[in-house]
Amino acid sequence: MNETAERQMQFLFALRQRGVTDKRVLEAMEKVDRGAFVKGTFSERAYEDMPLPIACGQTISQPSVVGLMTQALDVQPRDKVLEIGTGSGYQAAVLSHLARRVYTLDRHKRLVTEAQKVFDDLGLTNITTLPADGSRGYPEQAPFDRILVTAAAEDPPGPLLAELKMGGIMVVPVGQSDAVQHLIKVTRTETGYDYEELRPVRFVPLIEGMGQD
Ligand code: SAH
């Protein structure tokens, strides 16, 4: 077995071991080379199951957390998905293999520009990037079948709840940024919203307004 194939096998094995068992999610993650989203000195650690620093003081999430969040989101092939927190673009790339269209927003223009470049290089044409404050949602394209927030909010943001379709699902880390947060799965029903607590996580905070760069 060559080095790339072996690395790939270990990467997928680690995901399964940490509870990422959904076949479609594993297939989507197999298609996306995480190495394309990690730059500079950390690139050699791209296949390890750990978060890594990216530009603008942000982080690319741990692959198993990306897998578990994607699994909880239960994305369907016809879905229109909104991601808040483009970061490196890795999570959006994984979603792009499962959904019809992915809209991804980040408050740092630089991250959006860099992620767009990687999507172009990889030929991922069903992702739309936008520099914007995602805590206000994305009314121009609402409503969404699925919403994934990849930064921690103190509560599930109201504008995002409002932009969920009936039967839609949102996955969001909730809690203070310097404490343990919980991954919450919100399902919109005929009568309101159902909340399910999934697991403890640690994310950078969701911050209102645009970033400096
Ligand atoms: N999903 C990313 C990791 C996200 S890190 C990946 O796959 O690499 C969290 C990101 O959320 C950061 O890039 C940060 O800039 C962004 N963010 C924080 N608050 C935001 C807001 N209000 N609107 C949009 N993006 C926000």
Image (cartoon, rainbow, N blue to C red):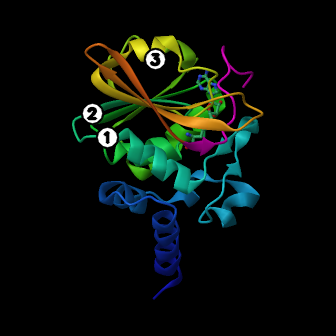
Q: Are marks 3 and 2 in contact (CB under 8 Å)?
A: no
Which residue lies under the disc numbered 1?
75
Q: Secondary structure at mark 3?
A: helix
Amino acid type at image mark 1:
Val
Which residue lies under the disc numbered 3?
160
Segment colored magenta: 199-213
Q: Position of residue 109 (x, y in %)?
A: 63, 26
Q: Are marks 1 and 2 in contact (CB under 8 Å)?
A: yes
Q: Position of residue 73 (x, y in %)?
A: 38, 39
Reply above or below: 96 against 186: below
Which image quarter: residue 143? top left
Whole-number angstrom distance, CA of label 1 to CA of label 3: 17 Å
Which residue lies under the disc numbered 2?
79
Whole-number angstrom distance, CA of label 3 to CA of label 2: 16 Å
Q: Position of residue 158 (x, y in %)?
A: 50, 12
Say whether disc 3 or disc 2 marks the residue closer to the N-terminus: 2
